[in-house]
Image (spheres, coloured by chain):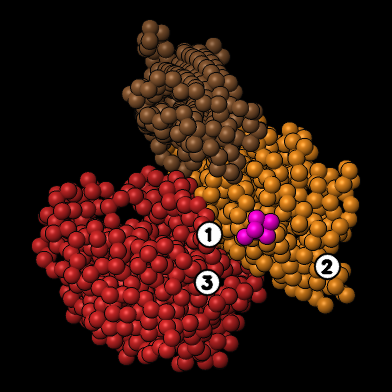
Chain colours: A orange, B brown, C red
Amino acid sequence: MIITDVLCPFCGALCDDIVVEVEKNKIIEVREACEIGVSKMMGHERIATPMIRENGELKETTYENAIDKTAEILVNSLRPLIYGWSSTTCEAHRKGIELAEELGAVIDNTASVCHGPSILAIQNVGLPSCTLGQIKNRADLIIYWGSNQAEAHPRHMSRYTSFPRGFFSEEGRRGKKVVVLDVRKTTTVEVADDFIQVAPGEDYPVLSALRAILAGEENVVPSCVGGVSKEKLIELVEKMKSARFGILFFGLGLTHSRGRYNNVVNAISLVRELNAHTKFVIMPMRGHYNVTGFNQVCTWETGFPFAVDFSRGQPWYNPGETSAVDILNREECDAVLVIASDPGAHFPKKSIEFMAKIPVIQIDPYPNPTTELADVVIPSAIAGIEVEGTAYRMDKVPIRLRKIIEPNHLSDEEILSRVLNKVRERRGE
Amino acid sequence: MRVTLTPKKDFKVPVEAETIKPDNFAGKNKSEIESIALWHGNKEVKLGSLFDVKVEGVNKEETKIVIEGDASRIKRIGEGMTSGEIMINGNVDMHCGAMMSGGKIIVKGDSDAWAGREMIGGELVVEGNAGNYLGAGYWGAEKGMGGGMIRVHGDAGDYVGGHMGDGEIIVKGSAGLLPGLDMSGGKITIEGNTTLPGGEMKNGMMVIKGKVLEMLPSFRFEGEEIVDSLKLKKFTGDLVRRGSGTLYVNLIPGE
Amino acid sequence: MELLIKNGVVYDPINEIRGEKMDICVKEDKIVSKVKNPKVIDANGKLVMPGGVDIHSHIAGGKINAGRLLRPEDGRKGAEPRGKLTRVCTGYSVPNTYATGYRYAKMGYTFVMEPATPPLLARHTHEELIDTPILDNAILALLDNNWMTMEYVKSGETKKLAAYVAWMIKAVKAYGVKIVNPGGDEAWGWGKNVNIDDSVPNFDVTPRDIIDGLAEANEMLNLPHSIHIHCNDLGHPGNYETTLKSFDVVKGRSNANRQVMHATHVQFHSYGGSGWKDFESKVDEIAKYVNAKKHVTIDMGQVMLGDTTTMTADGPLEYGLHMITGRKWTNLDVELETGGGITPFLYSSKVAVNTIQWAIGLELALLIKDPWKIALTTDHPNGAPFITYPIVISLLMNKQKRGEVMANVHKAINKRAILPSIGRELDWNDIAIMTRAAPARILGLDRYGKGHLGVGADADVAIYDVSPEERESKKIQSALLHAKYTIKGGEVVVRDGEIVAVPEGRTYWVNPEFDGESTKDMLGDLTGKFEKYYSVNLANYPVQDAYVPHPVEIKTKV
């Protein structure tokens, strides 16, 4: 059976034109997707059954037991942390937020270790942005800053930005200029028209210099800022001002270098000010396919996008305090539920060392380094392959993930729903 | 009245204690103070279950709270206080003196992040070091500190006085990255070194008596002036937004 | 389940009941003529009205959520913990979905129209509505800056345009057609804007053509609601002329049941003057027009003095506001369809313009003689958050109260507004019309059981603990903010101002039937648009049934 218009549950580009061939409830071929997408959709090793750690070893058990154990850990916790969410559906997010509310837990998603700084920056200055189709049809200047999307979002350029022919850009790639700013020559640079190398950690002063030039104050700008010559900076400002429609995409190179969210504030402010001269927009290159979705759901349900602390009933939002890595590094929490993410592979050593000391529950389709830390492991069905539901693309366009094959495991939503019921049962509600 | 609180044990899960402030203790006896509510993680508990309480004197006018021992896991002490005094004989956790409008807090040790957040009056003294976001604003809020005085005898972390509208911060040691972000009024003095001061500065004054390790490229040099009997270089900015903040600097990079 | 609401003072304008002491009977989810074994609610001396109907309030979707994300400092303002039945609440001008549902219900409202959904993002709006408790709801789809619309308007292919409108409304589970600064967002795609007779860049049509084309398609499809328009030129001095020109575009059309144009938040469109210095009220001109004509209805878009968050699909307007205030600004242009922007705004009593804006909204309600032509709104949250409605009502009912406010605001109000000279005070019947009967009728929902208490109507009832004779503003405000009872679909959801039940709301959507041949031709064009220009595939575009778990489908025939 051939299934068309399938969404790829990998990166924030959320391609929805994938063709999948299924035979006997198995995916046998994936077309149109990038290499990573194909490998993701073809599937790999799964967690077969629920497991509970006994005497240091994970032992197979039933869903019932694993869910009950999960509820027991969470109910007895004074400060539970519930973390992950970026590779599952918004339907699961909603259930998770309800669970966090019920428990008085802290809930956070992977944004807090990727584009959390971008969100903090948006809260400071806003975000002049648009949907990706707008860029495809109109943009004639495309800037990637600290983002190597050729590797992280392989089809981003071919589907949405540099290559496609749009309504007002019939020439395709020939009618568009691509500029890359980064600390090193990435693979994206190979398809760019211009590359500006910024010294590591110098994004903030470079952006300030660009804004000073734009404001007509180029006299005060020194001859070299952050490793970039003043001439080059002036040339870039001219290029931006003379574009018909410009877009600045930024990645972790900007959010995670010195200055963090303030780099993004500076970049957004630059774009905002460019609108006095021409049309200019900006967009974070969100990583996981539904990292944006969690931030959306969490915002409409709690008022805040991530790092929400329900311990006192009403939500308290304070990234740096209520964000997962900070809580773990400060050893504040006494239990962690990890879902649809892998902090065991991506968190700082200090956080992981602390996770090894407290009860950890993992809900995920795949074994990964977090499994090694987990005391309870609950396998789930794969969202977007075995479960349908909503995901939000990096530009906040919501699309419905398709179910392609029948699952052998419970969905994240169902697992969380059962955990919630068990929690209520244990509390005698 | 002098109330001494001594933590009964080391907390790992932090306690949230904005109820520990003179406004809330004034005129109360020992058992009333012991029954004041605090949050320990997701449980509401009584103050008496976490602290030994000693009450001396009865004067309602002058309520002084002394915390003996380690308060490095007690957040929000003195948050929103309007009068009286708090003395912490040790380190203190986040949000100490946040949103305070009067009275005085003395921290003998270090304070963690967000000390004096959104303060509008009163005085906060940290005799050790202060963490990040000293005297800063809340996420998304346009104004941070609106008045009052913060003194830090040691060093301060990153983002001192972000979005400051009024009041004064003095750091006797050095400060981290980007102090005085988006400042629109008030005064920040850093007696040691700092990095990239005054980003997005609109108005107000910063005085860096040590060395600026890195300068923003968007400030205009205006000449030299005598400030606090020091000959300092005067800059105006942040010109990215045509700001008219004043930045006095002793030593710039390369000096 | 049966209820008997006994001895209330009933205002049910659709059924011409004007403050009569009578009983209302409820069985299951409908109003009935009698009941056998009811639970009795004593409404003696209390006001009884149909549940409130808000015709225009930005409660759900991409824009409001971008507003929430933009403003954690607003979010923390209204923070309330989870209750036994209720979820957490946050926000003042940008409340979370739960706060939205509970706060409306506490004010006796049971239906809210989310008035500006970009079709591409409709799935998001519906997701939020699922999480908005209690309220019945519907959405209006933005169809005016759409390339398909503009191309059909230009080519004069009205049947294909109607087919497109029908297909889109059905595809995104919408209730009707929304127009926001027609042509303006397409121009904003290049950082520009247009007024009613300017040519939209690259499309060679004028906003006037777009309004006329969509009105024709709307009437051809026989939709329950008329076109719902946010006119060009919003918020600019002297814009009342554009507003009157916009009204005039459809003056030759008619519909037996209703208006053919609903113009929203007209407060923002009733400005005179050539700049901010001589900015003044032109409500006299607007009211003269509306009083004389039958084809147009409006809602207020009242401004209240204080801080709020502005958000509209009018991209260039929000950028302009941001340039005035320098405050943070979010923009979201939506490919082939529309745009949108968000920026916080403080309406200050010390600022002449803001004070006059405050007066203008009230003037509209007081100078338009027939309350059936004007619904009460604040264009939540643009003029003010919806929780200020009780204050707005108390001002409309009390001249002295208005005078007290005017004494403490910028003196420009005395010269450049009309309010100081207006003596009219609205009564409860007027209020019942403006807050439930008129919005229901303008939306065409009166035919589907909303906005009245006649037998067969939905059992959506508000009971306020205030005597009809009460004149003291504080008492009126308090009673309206915390209803004694709100009954939604026959279930008591609010008692003594507190939430006591949290049923899920229903979503009204229209399924317009239209000529198959035109639809087929249109789909050919639409397929081309998706293949070449959209960033999603056509197969993934329509909103699946899963997003409307409690639908009320309204089928219309040509």
Q: Which disc is residue C84 wearing?
A: 1
Mark nearer the viewer, 3 or 1: 1
Compared with A188, C103 (above or below) is below
**Which residue carries the number 3 mark?**
C504
Image-quadrant location for residue C7 = bottom left
Find numbered disc 2 in the image and state the secondary structure of the residue it sits on. loop
- Which chain's residue wears label 3? C
Residue under the point 88% across and 75% down? A24
Circle 2 residues within 10 Å: few <14, some 14–19, many ≥20? few
State the residue position of label 2.
A408
Whether pointer 1 and pointer 2 mark residues with C-beta atoms closer than 8 Å, the reply is no
In this rendered view, identify the residue nearer to me: C507 or B183.
Answer: C507
| Location of residue C512 in the rendering, given as x and y in whole percent from the top left corner | 50, 86
Report the residue at 38% width, 81% height from top: C4
Q: Position of residue A67 (x, y in %)?
A: 76, 57
Q: Amino acid at mark 3?
A: Glu
Residue B138 visible in the snapshot: yes
